Every structure is written in structure tokens, then in C-alpha cells.
Amino acid sequence: MIKVSIIGSGNVAQHLIHAFANENNIEILQVFARNPDDLIDIINPNKIVSDFKYLQKVDLFIIAVSDNSIIEVSAKIPFENCLVAHTSGSIDLNVLNSKNRKAVFYPLQTFSKTKKLNFKEIPICIEAQNSRDYSIIEYVAESISNNVQKIDSKQRKALHVAAVFVCNFTNHLYQVGNEICNENNINFEILKPLIQETANKILLLSPKEAQTGPAKRGDSQTINEHLKFLKNENQIGIYILLTKSIIDNGKKL
Ligand SMILES: NC(=O)c1ccc[n+]([C@@H]2O[C@H](COP(=O)([O-])OP(=O)(O)OC[C@H]3O[C@@H](n4cnc5c(N)ncnc54)[C@H](OP(=O)(O)O)[C@@H]3O)[C@@H](O)[C@H]2O)c1
């Protein structure tokens, strides 16, 4: 049985608590939360601590706090030579406080507290400073996911940038589409089969093969009509930038 404690009570921490709760070989000993009310419905209140001094030694501490607080929080763990992993896509392993052994446990997915996920399908990118610690992280990751991958800090940073493009920017474009629908009294629901098919198609085709639309076809009249239609400067800027990127990409071999 591996004992794990989680620090944080946000999106990732809550999903990890649910995922580990279903595993017999992992015990969540404690969860640190500045605000215990965040976790009251999802874990035994006796396991919640709000002061670092009440943390007990475990096989692995998982820090799931905002990127900006990882350095500060890792320094507050009141032990030495324990294994400590953070869950960030963009933060280097080395920023963790040197009094403990450092690792990374980065689940590559978009987590919101209110949206359930099947953790078994979520890639977990792991990294550790030595093979013994790697084995511990790997064991914990494989207990909740069928897709565990060794990814170093440099690769993870690249992955995170790619993830911002395919997830965060794409979602922002949904928001722009939603605004355009609202301004024209159209229910955004009508676009959902298109959104769904766009995501499904990428499972079978490369992004370049899957690209359609006026920029891909070189339909300059349609592009100019769209630019005349748009009134919002921000939307015009995004349209021009992405159109140029699609046209330039089409010219590449
Ligand atoms: N959300 C995702 O989709 C996702 C995906 C993969 C990886 N990650 C990574 O996972 C980590 C957590 O992300 P998240 O989305 O779960 O964030 P989140 O929902 O915003 O939660 C952040 C948590 O950090 C706590 N916290 C912040 N500063 C703290 C401090 N100084 N001391 C103690 N606790 C502190 C917050 O406590 P309060 O509530 O008290 O402020 C909150 O519990 C980040 O490193 C992020 O990059 C996120």
C-alpha cells in the first residue's frame, strides 16, 4: 500500500482524490486545503488539514496548487528526503524545494471540478530524479491511468504549449463563436455537431488533412465577406491571424 497526500483543493486535487479513492493499492492519508469546505463532500473530514504542521510523512506528496505557489508550498512541507511531485505542465521539476526528492505527476487533461472524467484514459506525464523514485511515481500513476509516459521537463513544457493551442485557444474560439451566435439570435447548440465532428475527425486524420474552410480553399471572396461582416476588432484580428496561418501552412510541403 502506497500512502499519498495531496496538497491543494482545486480542480486537479479533487479529480485525483476521486481517482485514488477507487484504488485499493493507494491510500490518501491527508489532503491539505486552505479552505476545508472545498473538500467536505468528497473526503473524510478527518483527513483534511489546513496547517502544514499537521501533515504526516507519506510515500508521496502531490502538490496540486496554482503554478505560482508551487515553490512556496514545496518549501512548507515539514519533512526532508520525502518524495514530492507537482502536477504542472509548465513548471520545471527543479523548482521544487531541494530538501525533498523531486518528481512531476502531470495529468494531461483539462480538469474542471464539475465535470467528471475517466482517469484511466488520461495520459500522465511523469518525471523523477532517479530510477527508484521514478518507479514509485510510475506505480502510483499506473494505478489510476492506462497511459503513463516518461516526459522530461523540456518536453513537458513543449507539450503544455501545444496543449494551450489545442485546448485553451480552441475553447476560446468556441466562446467567440458563441458571441457571434448570440449577437445574431442563433442558438449556439446548432454548432455542437460541427464541434463534435471536428474533434472526432482528428482521431482519424492529421490536422493538416482535416483542415477545411475558406482559408484552406483559397476562397478570398468569402474571406473578404467575413471580414466585412465582423465588427468587433478583436474578432477581426483573430480571423486575420488564423486565416494567414492556415494559408501559410497550406504552402508548406
Ligand atoms: N485544471 C487543469 O486543467 C490542469 C490540468 C493539468 C495540470 N494542472 C496543474 O495542476 C495544478 C493545480 O491546478 P488547478 O486547476 O487544480 O488549480 P485551481 O483549481 O485553481 O486550484 C488551485 C489550488 O491551489 C491552492 N493554492 C494556491 N496557492 C496556495 C498557497 N500559497 N498555499 C496553499 N494552497 C494554495 C488553492 O487554494 P485556495 O482555493 O485556498 O486558493 C487551490 O486549492 C497547477 O499546477 C496546474 O498547472 C491543471
Image (cartoon, rainbow, N blue to C red):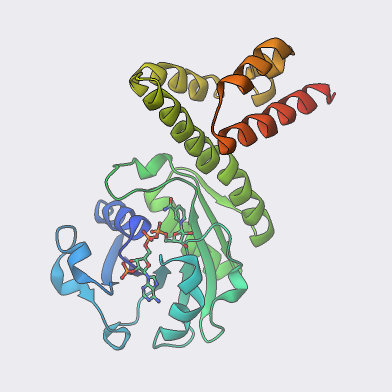
Image location of residue 104, percent across then percent down: 53, 64
At 56% from the left edge and 25% from the top edge, which residue is drawn?
Answer: 230
Image location of residue 195, percent across then percent down: 46, 23
Of the pair 89 and 241, the residue shown nearer to us: 241
Find residue 190 and report its image quarter. top left
Image location of residue 156, percent across then percent down: 62, 55
Of the pair 188 and 199, the residue shown nearer to us: 188
Find residue 95 and report its image quarter. bottom right
Which quarter of the rendering shows the C terminus?
top right
Residue 129 in view, yes or no = no
Of the pair 127 and 219, the residue shown nearer to us: 219
Which quarter of the rendering shows the N terminus?
bottom left
In the image, is 188 to the left or to the right of 129? left
At 79% from the left edge and 27% from the top edge, which residue is drawn?
Answer: 248
In the image, is 151 to the left or to the right of 1? right
In the image, is 170 to the left or to the right of 253? left
Q: Is residue 60 above or below residue 221?
A: below
At 28% from the left edge and 75% from the top edge, which residue is drawn?
Answer: 34
Task: Tell me how many marks there are.
Answer: 0
Q: Is residue 17 above or below residue 209?
A: below
Q: Is residue 89 above or below residue 226?
A: below
